[in-house]
Image (cartoon, grey):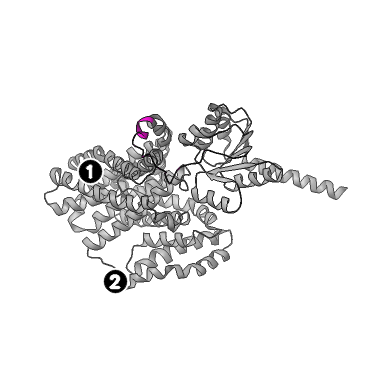
């Protein structure tokens, strides 16, 4: 148990340490992996440590992809900016990286091509983690980024099949029959309840049906887990299932980041390779930015999406490990991936402020056309503004409507906004963190505002922008944590309520009212 205690302690200390300087814990877990690899033998590191961590990492990645699938819709993957952006970026990246690798590091063109292909992909795990942490998986740019990553993962599987000779057999055609399982999967989810059986149902569908099932027909288990999530994405309990798997997924993903750090100790050649690739990393983001602009997205969406995709991919390591000609570059690639995570994580944390800082320069590249991510500026006859139309926002909307008011709901998830609109509610697609929305919106008819989003930063931006636009009416917000209350109030909110605390007060009030009725 000495080594296990040492490994858990190292992951904890490094994760806690980087959090104190404003970096996400995953950066610390990467560093902990290198540290364990360096000093682990002195603590009796078992030979099977690497394979065990890789196994745990695989479980974490599959559960992550399953939960992503639960939040996706198939039609968003088929959108032009997703498919076209992924394919065009892959082709251009390979064309740029391959000659550079051949000139500086590789003695053969084939090896340079394989490394160039590995570098063309972006990190699904990092991007999903960062978007999830900011609660932006449902936003337009979040969905675009995840869709591109899924297309990239499919490309990676094709590359593996072609270069490693691992071409799927005829049984792989069964994947097209997967939608036939949907009624059975829905019935299973209905029967699972809301306790630990729901968690086990998610694990079975992602790891067994998706993971093992797809491997049996010659496809990657990761794609199987994603497909299972997609098939369940329309079920009413898909959100609850995703939340129930959250902690489990987080623990397994610690193993993923540790395993990258433990993939090998760097020598000077590996460090030089990683430094050069770190210098080339901005090319990925620049390419994505201009490609997405070419598909008529606005500068803000293109910039934030590109930034979330600016990291080398763990899937590149899988490609390198699965193709003999690329294996000598596995450790240098692992160092490059780790370094790209170190650079990308803090940049993604400040994506919105960075765009605001460079907005005038970036908007010069925006096409003058109707953009698919354009946001309306007219709020109609609404008198109360509700930001965020999840469960809290929807409840507030219904209560205000019942009181005879005219609320308008705003949500950054274009599909959620459309679903509300189809249900007859006055809800429009708009992002509170988008300066373009604030530059043109007319607030003259709005008397009060409700901040019902879960993300703290989005609440702070909305409150500040409302006050900056001269809005003097009351701003009411909910908060998930006590330490958020003061921050939201300082940003301009008049009243901030702790969600769970207010729910408890409401229950108590109803209980007392019930007693009074019985007594009378």
Residue beneath the point at 36% across and 54% down: 150
The residue positioned farthest toward the bottom in the image shown: 170
Residue beneath the point at 44% across and 54% down: 68
Judging by the rendered image, the residue that carries numbered circle 2 is 169
Which image quadrant is residue 210 in? bottom left
Q: Is residue 361 magenta?
A: yes
Question: Residue 266 got which mark?
Answer: 1
Please report the bounds of the magenta region as a residue range.
360-377
Query: If you read the primary sequence from the N terminus, does the residue marked by circle 1 or circle 2 appear first?
Result: 2
Q: Judge by depth and name the residue closer to the eye, 87 or 262.
A: 87
Mark 1 burial class by Cα count in 10 Å: few <14, some 14-19, many 20+: some
Percent position of residue 436, x then y: 46, 35
The residue positioned farthest toward the right in the image shown: 520
Q: Judge by depth and name the residue closer to the eye, 514 or 411.
A: 411
Q: Is residue 21 visible?
A: no
Q: Judge by depth and name the residue closer to the eye, 131 or 318.
A: 131
Q: Please identify, in this view, whether the residue under mark 1 or under mark 2 is nearer the observer.
A: 2
Percent position of residue 7, x then y: 37, 46
Percent position of residue 457, x then y: 50, 36
């Amino acid at each position: 148990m000495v080594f296990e205690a040492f490994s858990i302690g190292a992951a904890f200390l490094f994760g806690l340490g980087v959090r104190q300087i404003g970096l996400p814990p995953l950066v610390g877990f990467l560093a902990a992996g290198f540290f364990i690899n360096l000093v682990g033998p002195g603590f009796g590191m078992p030979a099977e440590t690497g394979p065990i961590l890789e196994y745990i990492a695989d479980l974490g990645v599959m559960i992550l992809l399953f939960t992503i699938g639960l939040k996706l819709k198939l039609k968003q993957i088929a959108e032009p900016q997703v498919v076209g952006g992924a394919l065009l970026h892959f082709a251009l990246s390979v064309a740029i990286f391959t000659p550079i690798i051949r000139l500086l590091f590789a003695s053969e063109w084939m090896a340079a091509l394989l490394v160039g292909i590995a570098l063309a992909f972006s990190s699904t795990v990092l991007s999903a983690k960062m978007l999830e942490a900011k609660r932006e998986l449902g936003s337009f740019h979040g969905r675009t980024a995840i869709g591109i990553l899924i297309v990239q993962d499919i490309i990676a599987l094709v590359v593996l099949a072609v270069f490693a000779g691992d071409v799927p057999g005829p049984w792989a055609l069964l994947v097209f029959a997967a939608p036939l399982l949907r009624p059975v999967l829905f019935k299973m989810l209905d029967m699972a309840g809301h306790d630990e059986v729901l968690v086990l149902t998610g694990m079975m569908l992602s790891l067994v049906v998706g993971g093992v099932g797809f491997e049996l027909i010659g496809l990657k288990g990761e794609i199987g887990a994603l497909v299972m999530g997609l098939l369940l994405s329309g079920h009413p309990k898909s959100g609850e299932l995703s939340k129930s798997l959250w902690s489990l997924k987080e623990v397994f993903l610690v193993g993923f980041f540790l395993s990258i750090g433990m993939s090998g100790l760097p020598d000077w050649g590996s460090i030089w390779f990683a430094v050069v690739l770190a210098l080339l990393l901005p090319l990925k983001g620049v390419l994505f930015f201009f490609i997405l602009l070419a598909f008529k997205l606005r500068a803000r969406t293109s910039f934030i999406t590109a930034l979330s995709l600016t990291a080398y991919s763990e899937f590149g390591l899988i490609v390198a490990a699965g193709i003999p000609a690329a294996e000598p570059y596995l450790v240098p690639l692992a160092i490059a991936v780790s370094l790209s995570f170190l650079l990308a994580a803090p940049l993604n944390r400040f994506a919105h402020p960075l765009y605001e800082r460079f907005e005038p320069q970036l908007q010069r590249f925006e096409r003058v056309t109707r953009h698919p991510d354009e946001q309306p500026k007219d709020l109609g006859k609404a008198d109360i503004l509700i930001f965020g139309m999840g469960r809290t926002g929807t409840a507030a909307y219904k209560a205000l409507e019942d009181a005879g008011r005219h609320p308008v709901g705003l949500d950054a998830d274009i599909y959620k906004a459309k679903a509300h609109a189809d249900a007859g509610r006055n809800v429009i697609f708009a992002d509170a963190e988008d300066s373009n929305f604030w530059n043109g919106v007319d607030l003259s008819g709005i008397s009060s505002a409700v901040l019902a989003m879960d993300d703290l930063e989005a609440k702070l931006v909305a409150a500040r922008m409302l006050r900056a636009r001269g809005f003097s009416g009351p701003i009411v917000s909910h908060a998930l944590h006590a330490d958020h209350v003061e921050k939201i109030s300082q940003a301009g909110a008049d009243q901030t309520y702790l969600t769970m605390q207010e729910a408890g007060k409401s229950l108590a009030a109803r209980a007392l009212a019930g007693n009074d009725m019985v007594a009378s």
